[in-house]
C-alpha cells in the first residue's frame, strides 16, 4: 500500500517561482536603497506594484493581520493570472480565488476558516482546473520564504517526506553530506510581491508588528522582490530610530506604504480589534451560492469606492470600537 | 450514549485527559484547542501550549478562534514566528501534537487535502496540510481527535496529507522523517485507539461507557486490532463538563451548544 | 596558483561537534520543559552545567555583552579540554585559551581586539598545537547555530568556497537539486553549553536582550544542549508575560539563571555601560609577557573570590557609574 | 608626502570618497569605520551602513570601537542579528563591503588568518576571517583599505582567508561564489588600485600627490598593471581633515593622533 508515495524522491508538480539565487540577486542589486518617501494610496500601490501574472504572498495569518484594502483593490482593479502562496491563507486567498484573479497557487491552507468551517466560494474556485495547484505544508512555505530571505535556492527539512503532500509539491530530496540522512529539499520562494499589514510604519517603510504573532512576515518581507505595507498608523521616522530592536521589516525591503486604519477588518488585529464574526458569518452564508457570491462582490467590492467607504458599510468606526472592546476583553464576542 | 453530554463534549473531555502537565503540546484548530484549555484548567496548569503562528504558553482569556489570533499570544511567554516554533518541533522540543480529524487509515495517515482521484480537479477540495504535516512529522507523538464513522476511518485515504506510520513499521524513518516519532493515540466519540508496537496498526485500547467492540468496528472502514486488556473510559465528570461549558467554550464554538 | 584550494569540494579539518539531528533530538526530548526556578550562583552554574571536555559557545560579541563572571569562574574552577566556538570572540576566548581551559576551537575571530590590536597571550595560546583548530567565517558559525536551532544537520551557503578558510574548515559542498549550482554545506553546530549575558531574565530563564544587537544569540540559545544565562537584573515572570514579543530566549532553552550586575565588564553592555578601555589597555599590556599573564590571572581571577570582589577590584560601582556615563553620552571616553 | 596629514589620515580621507550616497555599505573594524563616518558627514549623509553584529544605518554619536558595540545600533533603523545582515548580503542587498588590510595578492585575495606553513602551529596566528570572508563573497563589490608595502602586497598569500578573484577570471563563479561579485578597489597610502577586466589582476588607477609609479611598484611584491590613463588623487582637503580630526576620531583611535 502507498508504495509509490512513501519512497518518492521528488515531487511531481510545477514550481511556480524561479528559485535561482543569482537571478534574485540581480533583481535585489537594483532595488532602491534610498531613504525616500514611499507613502501612497491603495489604488496607486496596487496599480503600480502589482502586474497581471505576478506571484503574490500575503502576510499575517489569513484572517489575522491581513491587508484587506489591498486585497479588495486587487479584485476591484481586476488583476488576472496571479500566482499566490496559499500559506496560512483564509479570507485573503478566498477573495482572490473567488474573484478570478488567481491562476496558480502553492497551497498549504486555503478554503478553511478554522473553527468556522469552509468557504463554499473558495471551494468552488480551488476545485476547478482554472487554478493550477501544488501542495505543501505551512512549515514548508515558511521555510521556503526563509530560504529566499537568506539568498539561497533551497533549504533542507525533515517533514513532507513519505506523503502525497510531498508528491504533489515541487520539493525534491537531498542527502546530508555529513550524516548520509535523507532530507526534503525545499525550493526557495521569492514572490514578486508581498502584501503585509502592520501596526505602524514610517514613510520610508520601516515597519513594526507591535502585538501578536509574526507568522513568517519577517522572512516574507525579505524574500519578496517588492513589498506593499499597509499600516494602522503612520509614525515618524524618529520613532523608528528610538527603538531599533522593534523594527520588524526594514525600509529597504519596502516599495509602498499606505496608512489604512482598521485595515485588517474583518480579521483580528492583535492589540487593536477582534474578528468581526458577524461579517464572517454573513460572508460564509452569502457565498454558499454563486448568485450570493456575485452579490457580495458587487456590493462589498466593485460598488465600493475605497476602504473608507467599505468601513462605513460594515458599520463604521462605531463597529470598529465594538470590535476593539472585544479585543481588549471589555466585551465578550456575544456582546 | 448518556444524555448528559454530547459527542463533542465527550471528545473534548476525553482528549483533555491525555495532556500531561509540564509537557509541550502543539495545538491545532478546534477540538484540540478546547481540550488543551480544559486540561489547563483542571489537571495540567503548566502544560506548554504552542500555536503554529508563533505563540508559546499563553494564559488564554478565552477560546481562540484561530491558532494565530491574539488570544494565543495573550500573556504568552514568547510571541515569535511560525519558523521559530516549527524549528522547535524539528529540534525535538515538542512532545505532543494534537490534530483535528479527517480521513484516517489503519496506520494513522491523515487526509485533509482532497477527496477523489484527480488532483487538479478533485471531487472535493479540502484546506490542505496547514501545519499538520509538519507537526505529525516533527513532534514526538501525534494525537488525533476525531468523531468516528466509516467514512472517516477508511482502508486507504485518498491523499496522505499528514504522515502516520505510512505503510508500516520503519516506513517513516525510511522516508526520512525523524526517528522514533509517530502516531500515539486517536481519541474518538466511541473509544480511545492506540497502535500495535509490531505492526504499527491501529488498535482499540479503551471503550467509552456503553460502547461495544462491535459498535466501534462497525464505524470503522478497516479491521481494528485490540489491546490485550481493553479498558473502559471513565465518562466526563460534572466538573469537566461545567468548566468546559462555562469557562472554555461558553459561546459553543466547538461543543456546539 | 592556488589550484589545490579554489576547486576543493570539502574542508580537511576536524568536525568537533556531532551534527546528527536525531542525536540532538534524543537529547532535547529529555530536556526539562517545566516552569521551575533556575536561579543559582555563578559557582553552581559552572560546577553543575560545565564538564571537562564540553564544547561551549559564548553569546554577545567577544567584548560586547559577554558573560564575564561565568568565564572567570570556568578559569577559577580549572575546567579542562573544553571545545569552543571562536565566533566573534575576543576577551572570552582569550581568557579560556590563555588559562589552558581549551583544547580545540572552531575559529572565526580570536586573538584580535578590533581597533585595539591583538592579545599577546591569546596569540601564544592559539599558535600552539595544544589547541586543535579549524577555521570558519563569522557568517558560517552564525548559520551553523541556525542550522542546529532548526534541528537540521546542515545548511547551504554561498561563501567560504575557493579559499583556505574552506580548506581548513570541516565544511563540505553540495549541489542544489533545483539549480545545479554548487553551495557550501555547513554542518549544524549543537554546542554542549551556551553562556549568554542578557539585560533581564525571569527565574525560569525567559531572557530579554533589551538594547543593542543580538549577534547570533537567539539561534545559539536554541542550538545549545544546555544554556547558562547571566543577567543584569532578574525580573518577575509577569513582566515577561506582559510583552511576549520582547522575549529573546524562551525559558525552555535555559538551564541556569544568575543575576550578575555589571556582568559584561570590561565589555560594553548596550544601554548600560561602555567598554572599560583602561582595563583593556591594562590587560593587553600585562599579557605581553608570560610573567605578566601569570600575574594577571592570579590577581584578577584565582585570588578573587567572586564577581562582586572583582567589581570592587576594578573600581567598584563608582567605576561602573563612570562607564555608564560614557555609554549614555554624558562623558566622552577620555573623561 | 605632505606634512599636513599622516598616512592614516590620507587613507581615511581617500577611502571616504568612494562611498556613494544611498548605497548599502557593510563596514569592517577600524579604518573603514572612520572612512564611512567621514563620508556620512561630508557627501553621503544617507549611506546605509551595516555592521556585522546586526545593526543597520545608525546615527553614530561617535566612532565605534567594535562593529558590535552600542554606537553601531544608536538610533539605527534596525538592531537585528548577524544572521539577518549576513543573509541580506547573500540575497544581494549590499553594494559594498569595506575591509581592512592584511596580506593581499594580485587577485585581491586577503590573508588575515596565519603566517607560515604549518596550519596547526603557525609562525604567527592572526584573528581569522571574522566576517571578511562572508562579506567579500556575498557583497557586490569589495573595497580594501590598507597601507602599502611589499610585506603586505605579496606574490602569494600564506592563507586565502577572504576571496578576491582567487586565481583569475571566472574562478569565483567556478568555486560557487555568487556571480558578478568581487574586488573593486584597493585604497592605500600611495595610490588607488583597481582590477583589469580581462585578467582580474590588480592595476594602478590613481597616484596620490607626489607618488610615482616606481614608488608604488617598489612597495609591491608582485607586478602591477596600469590603467590606460593614470589619475592623480586630490589630496585631503582642509575640511576633510578637520572633520576627521574633530568629529570622527577625536580620540585618535584610528588616525593615531
Image (tube, coloured by chain):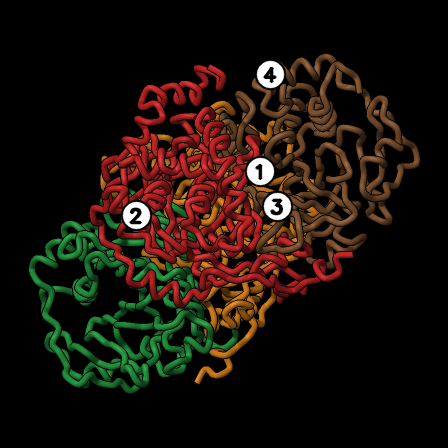
Chain colours: A red, B brown, C orange, D green
Q: What separation in Å lies between label 4 and label 2 (alpha carbons)? A: 44 Å
Q: Quarter of the image for the C terminus of chain D: give it.
A: bottom left
Q: What separation in Å lies between label 3 and label 1 (alpha carbons)? A: 47 Å
Tag count: 4
Q: What separation in Å lies between label 1 and label 2 (alpha carbons)? A: 46 Å
Residue C161: x and y, percent? 47, 71
> Pointer 4 and pointer 1: residues touching (CB < 8 Å)?
no
Tell me what residue is drawn at x 75 percent, y 36 percent. B186
Point out which mark residue A46 bears: 2
> Pointer 1 and pointer 2: residues touching (CB < 8 Å)?
no
Q: Output the chain of dot 4.
A: B
Tell me what residue is drawn at x 48 percent, y 83 percent. C3
Residue A330: x and y, percent? 43, 15
Point out which mark residue B247 bears: 4
Helix, strand or loop under label 4 = helix
The mark lying in front, picked from 3 and 4, is: 3
Residue D195: x and y, percent? 27, 79
Helix, strand or loop under label 3 = strand
The reply to whether label 3 and label 1 mark residues of one chain is: no
Amino acid at each position: 500500500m502507498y508504495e509509490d508515495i512513501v519512497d518518492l524522491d521528488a515531487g511531481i508538480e510545477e514550481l511556480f517561482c524561479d528559485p535561482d539565487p543569482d537571478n534574485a540577486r540581480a533583481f535585489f542589486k537594483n532595488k532602491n536603497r534610498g531613504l525616500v518617501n514611499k507613502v501612497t494610496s491603495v489604488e496607486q500601490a496596487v496599480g503600480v506594484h502589482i502586474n497581471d501574472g505576478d506571484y503574490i504572498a500575503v502576510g499575517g495569518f489569513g484572517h489575522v493581520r491581513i491587508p484587506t484594502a489591498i486585497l479588495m483593490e486587487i479584485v476591484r482593479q481586476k488583476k488576472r493570472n496571479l500566482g499566490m502562496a496559499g500559506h496560512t491563507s483564509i479570507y485573503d486567498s478566498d477573495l482572490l480565488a473567488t474573484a478570478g484573479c488567481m491562476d496558480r497557487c502553492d497551497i498549504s491552507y486555503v478554503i478553511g476558516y478554522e473553527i468556522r468551517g469552509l468557504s463554499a466560494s473558495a471551494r468552488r474556485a480551488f476545485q476547478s482546473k482554472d487554478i493550477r495547484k501544488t501542495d505543501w505544508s505551512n512549515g514548508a512555505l515558511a521555510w521556503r520564504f526563509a530560504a529566499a530571505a537568506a539568498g539561497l535556492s533551497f533549504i533542507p527539512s525533515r517533514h513532507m517526506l513519505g506523503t502525497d503532500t510531498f508528491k504533489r509539491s515541487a520539493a525534491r530530496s537531498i542527502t546530508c553530506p555529513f550524516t548520509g540522512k535523507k532530507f526534503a529539499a525545499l525550493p526557495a520562494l521569492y514572490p514578486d510581491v508581498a502584501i503585509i499589514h502592520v501596526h505602524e510604519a514610517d514613510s520610508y517603510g520601516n515597519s513594526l508588528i507591535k502585538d501578536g504573532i509574526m507568522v513568517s512576515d519577517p522572512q516574507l518581507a525579505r524574500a519578496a522582490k517588492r513589498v506593499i505595507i499597509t499600516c494602522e498608523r503612520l509614525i515618524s521616522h524618529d520613532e523608528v530610530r528610538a527603538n531599533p530592536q522593534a523594527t520588524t521589516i526594514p525600509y529597504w525591503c519596502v516599495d509602498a506604504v499606505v496608512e489604512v486604519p482598521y485595515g485588517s477588518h474583518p480579521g483580528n488585529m492583535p492589540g487593536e480589534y477582534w474578528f468581526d464574526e458577524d461579517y464572517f458569518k454573513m460572508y460564509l452564508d452569502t457565498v454558499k451560492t454563486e448568485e450570493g457570491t456575485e452579490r457580495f462582490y458587487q456590493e462589498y467590492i466593485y460598488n465600493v469606492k475605497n476602504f473608507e467607504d467599505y468601513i462605513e458599510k460594515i458599520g463604521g468606526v462605531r463597529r470598529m470600537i465594538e470590535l476593539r472592546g472585544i479585543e481588549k476583553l471589555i466585551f465578550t464576542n456575544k456582546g | 450514549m448518556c444524555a448528559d453530554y454530547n459527542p463533542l463534549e465527550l471528545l473534548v473531555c476525553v482528549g483533555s485527559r491525555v495532556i500531561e502537565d509540564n509537557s509541550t503540546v502543539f495545538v491545532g484548530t478546534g477540538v484540540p484547542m478546547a481540550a488543551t484549555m480544559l486540561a489547563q484548567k483542571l489537571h495540567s496548569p503548566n502544560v506548554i501550549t504552542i500555536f503554529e503562528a508563533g505563540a508559546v504558553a499563553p494564559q488564554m482569556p478565552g477560546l481562540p478562534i484561530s491558532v494565530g489570533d491574539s488570544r494565543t499570544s495573550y500573556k504568552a511567554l514568547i510571541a515569535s514566528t511560525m519558523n521559530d516554533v516549527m524549528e522547535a518541533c524539528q529540534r525535538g522540543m515538542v512532545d505532543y501534537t494534537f490534530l483535528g480529524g479527517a480521513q484516517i487509515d489503519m496506520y494513522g495517515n491523515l487526509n485533509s487535502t482532497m477527496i477523489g482521484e484527480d488532483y487538479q480537479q478533485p471531487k472535493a477540495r479540502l484546506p490542505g496540510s496547514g501545519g499538520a504535516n509538519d507537526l505529525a512529522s516533527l513532534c514526538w507523538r501525534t494525537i488525533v481527535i476525531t468523531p468516528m464513522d466509516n467514512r472517516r476511518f477508511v482502508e486507504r485515504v485518498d491523499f496522505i496529507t499528514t504522515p502516520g506510520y505510512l505503510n508500516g513499521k520503519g516506513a517513516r524513518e525510511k522516508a526520512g522523517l525523524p526517528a522514533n516519532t509517530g502516531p500515539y493515540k486517536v481519541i474518538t466519540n466511541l473509544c480511545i485507539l492506540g497502535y500495535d508496537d509490531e505492526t504499527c496498526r491501529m488498535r482499540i485500547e479503551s471503550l467509552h461507557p456503553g460502547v461495544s467492540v462491535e459498535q466501534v468496528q462497525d464505524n470503522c472502514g478497516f479491521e481494528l486490532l485490540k489491546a490485550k486488556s481493553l479498558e473502559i473510559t471513565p465518562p466526563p465528570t460534572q466538573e469537566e463538563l461545567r468548566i468546559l461549558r462555562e469557562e472554555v467554550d461558553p459561546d459553543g464554538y466547538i461543543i456546539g451548544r
